[in-house]
């Protein structure tokens, strides 16, 4: 177990990178706390797998350093880093039994047979496969195979971190939930550092203490699920997290007033500094209300999702979403109001602090 | 409601039936017909029963050809399968080397069999052949037309040259289909190069190897053209395999009855081996409960 930190870490697949766009992974400086549960969240091609492969040592970063507990491991091989990884598709050694699969990493490291037996039995118990110990691994279901993959990591007591690369992709929906809660349980009980790559926000938000949101090779925000929801630092976070995503409207700002065409919205405070360029107002649907007063909108459609309704409306020709209660009738001349607590301002896609 | 019976659809099957009849069924039945009859000429045949079969099965000649053929298949498999795996493991996985290797590997497979025989017949000659003269120059007393070992060595070498590519290409395809995650997992688990081969690559190659072994066994068991061109079954009859022997009997001596009986026995052996092989390889493995 160790803290994992990135020191000006960058990676480019092509030689001699110049522009920021040449990097598959742009500069990242951060530390993953020992024993924390982290999720790397982002769409395909955002660099999350690149970052994971750098941590696991399958890929050597072109720039910067990677440290495990203060020790530079940038140039160490995968074996020497002592990490475990669960892949997207179950990787089991087909010809071996479940027991032998778990014993394999220990045998390779020359551990004493008696100790291997103890460790393997413990691990079988942890992942709930004791009864299937002597079955051939290839005859198990996909979720059991993923547990074997995980078990091959858990069996080594001294792993620095367990990495997950979209491990639930091939698992049946009803097993996903079970496997995920089992992971959380293992995390709480044994305190492994876990890093979980996914493009599914539900998986990321329910699994992790802290979520690293990535977009186009860049880490756009690292924060708790609540922070990502309340204060998205980048329009991408607002749009990617939450369902539906954040409403974004181009505005012109003067002092504490944001102008959307002829309409005005009062901001919670003036922007401390507003860079030149594109300015957007960002309000989550949860903070957007359809009411009798405010800015006039045309309602396009109403989606009933059970607990509440999602109202899709047009504001100055731009589609926005608002949440409405099940029972609440919609006004005949609909207007929209933004609740002050949920108003964010973005300059060139990055959040601007408002107020004193 | 009464169902209208319309059997006209059967006419659509007719072309296939005719094709199969002329290409397989009629020739095979002709052979069966000859195998149970005898003739003294004038196209007059009379019933001989199982006499030819008994004669073939009781003859040393048949069993010697069979033994030579089995030995040949065994040697060829023992060399080509491991060699094919080793070459496939060492072929490049990406880059310009891939098409280059694939084309080089395919070349021997594209050459007509009698040409392969002719190539080696010349190549291995001690007077004008490069291989033969180099071996002689190195001080070996090499002559495939006179010495038993030299003849076998030449034919085995030729077959390895001709057919190892097939095993290589099959194995290469099998290796390329193994997802990268397996190799990454093996690295993380600290597996040695041998363990990676033993526990990942070999199990994943299982299917293609079964096909490779079956194909190579069948082809080598039925080999005719290449050794016929190179040695003509000699010196003496040391490279007379079953098919060469069969042709000698049928065309050379015009012993239609024994040759037909031998054809059918030959055919049944091939069928039996295929069936055994198929049954063994498709049978689900036993699980320890």
Image (tube, coloured by chain):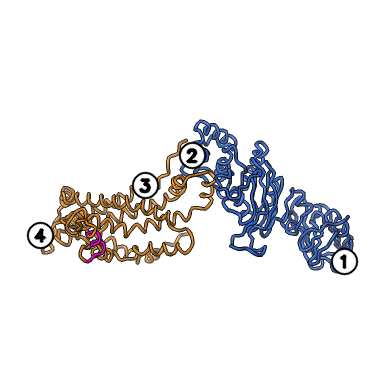
Q: Are marks 3 and 4 on the same chain?
A: yes
Chain identifier of the blue chain: A
Which quarter shows the N terminus of chain A? top right
What residue is pinned by disc 3? B279
Say which residue label 4 marks.
B40
Assign a secondary structure to mark 2. Answer: loop
Q: Earlier in the sequence, mark 1 or mark 2?
A: 2
Gap in angstroms between the C-alphas marked 1 and 2: 69 Å
Q: Which chain's residue wears label 1?
A: A
Chain that bears disc 2: A
Number of numbered labels in the structure image: 4
For marks 3 and 2, give the CA distance: 24 Å
Nearest to viewer (mark 4 / mark 1): 1
> Is B74 colored magenta in this rendering?
no
Residue A254 or A332: which is nearer the viewer? A254
Spatial CA distance of label 3 from label 1 is: 79 Å
Labels 3 & 1 near each other (Cβ < 8 A)? no
How far across and down, in percent of the image, does residue A129 sit? 56, 37
Q: Which residue is mark 2?
A: A97
Q: Colour of chain B?
A: orange
Element on which disc 3 rests: helix
Chain for numbered disc 3: B
* Residue appearing at x 34%, y 48% in the figure: B277
Q: Which residues are magenta?
A: B128-136
Disc 3 residue crowd, few under 14, some 14–19, many 20+, Cα 10 Å: few
Q: CA distance from mark 3 to mark 4?
A: 44 Å
Q: Residue at x 66, y 38 (%)?
A: A191
Above-or-below relation of A137 to A267: above
């Amino acid at each position: 177990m160790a803290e994992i930190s990135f020191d000006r870490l960058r990676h480019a697949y092509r030689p001699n990178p110049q522009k920021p766009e040449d990097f598959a992974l742009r500069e990242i400086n951060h530390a993953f706390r020992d024993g924390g549960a982290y999720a790397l969240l982002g769409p395909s091609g955002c660099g999350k797998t690149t970052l994971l492969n750098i941590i696991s040592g399958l890929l050597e970063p072109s720039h910067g350093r990677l440290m495990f507990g203060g020790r530079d491991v940038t140039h160490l091989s995968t074996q020497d880093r002592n990490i475990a990884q669960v892949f997207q598709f179950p990787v089991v050694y087909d010809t071996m039994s479940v027991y032998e699969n778990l014993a394999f990493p220990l045998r390779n490291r020359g551990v004493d047979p008696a100790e291997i037996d103890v460790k393997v039995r413990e691990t079988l118990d942890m992942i709930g496969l004791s009864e299937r110990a002597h079955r051939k691994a290839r005859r198990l279901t996909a979720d059991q195979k993923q547990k074997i993959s995980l078990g091959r990591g858990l069996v080594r007591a001294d792993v620095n971190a367990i990495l997950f690369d979209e491990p639930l992709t091939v698992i049946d929906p009803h097993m996903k939930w079970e496997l995920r809660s089992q992971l959380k349980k293992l995390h709480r009980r044994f305190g492994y550092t876990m890093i979980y790559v996914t493009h599914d926000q539900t998986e990321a938000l329910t699994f992790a203490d802290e979520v690293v949101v990535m977009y186009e090779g860049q880490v756009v925000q690292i924060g708790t699920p609540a922070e990502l929801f309340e204060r998205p630092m980048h329009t991408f976070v607002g749009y990617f997290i939450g369902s539906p995503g954040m409403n974004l409207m181009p505005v012109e700002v003067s002092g504490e007033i944001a102008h959307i065409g002829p309409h005005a919205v009062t901001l919670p405070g003036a922007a401390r500094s507003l860079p030149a360029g594109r300015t957007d107002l960002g309000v989550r649907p949860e903070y957007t209300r359809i009411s009798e007063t405010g800015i006039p909108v045309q309602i396009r459609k109403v989606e009933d999702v059970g607990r509440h309704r999602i109202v899709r409306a047009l504001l100055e020709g731009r589609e926005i979403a608002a949440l409405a209660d099940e029972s609440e009738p919609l006004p005949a001349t609909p207007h929209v109001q933004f609740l002050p607590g949920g108003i964010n301002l973005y300059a060139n896609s990055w959040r601007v602090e408002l107020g004193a | 409601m009464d169902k209208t019976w319309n059997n006209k659809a059967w006419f659509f099957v007719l072309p296939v039936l005719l094709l199969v009849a002329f290409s397989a069924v009629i020739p095979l039945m002709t052979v069966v017909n000859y195998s149970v009859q005898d003739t003294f000429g004038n196209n007059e045949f009379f019933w001989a029963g199982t006499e030819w079969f008994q004669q073939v099965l009781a003859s040393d000649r048949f069993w010697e050809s069979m033994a030579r053929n089995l030995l040949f298949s065994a040697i060829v498999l023992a060399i080509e399968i491991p060699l094919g795996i080793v070459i496939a493991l060492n072929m490049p996985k990406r880059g310009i080397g891939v098409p280059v290797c694939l084309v080089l590997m395919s070349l021997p497979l594209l050459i007509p069999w009698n040409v392969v025989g002719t190539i080696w017949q010349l190549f291995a000659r001690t007077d004008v052949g490069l291989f033969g003269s180099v071996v002689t120059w190195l001080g070996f007393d090499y002559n495939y037309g006179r010495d038993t070992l030299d003849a076998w060595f030449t034919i085995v070498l030729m077959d390895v040259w001709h057919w190892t590519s097939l095993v290589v290409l099959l194995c290469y395809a099998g290796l390329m289909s193994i997802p990268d995650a397996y190799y990454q997992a093996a690295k993380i688990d600290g597996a040695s190069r041998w363990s990676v081969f033993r526990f990942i690559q070999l199990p994943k190659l299982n299917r293609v190897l079964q096909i490779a072994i079956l194909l190579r066994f069948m082809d080598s068991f039925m080999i005719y053209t290449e050794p016929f061109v190179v040695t003509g079954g000699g010196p003496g009859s040391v490279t007379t395999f079953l098919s060469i022997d069969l042709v000698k009997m049928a065309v050379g001596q015009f012993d239609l009855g024994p040759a037909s009986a031998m054809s059918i026995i030959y055919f049944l052996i091939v069928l039996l081996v295929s069936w055994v092989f198929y049954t063994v390889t498709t049978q689900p493995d036993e699980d320890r409960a």
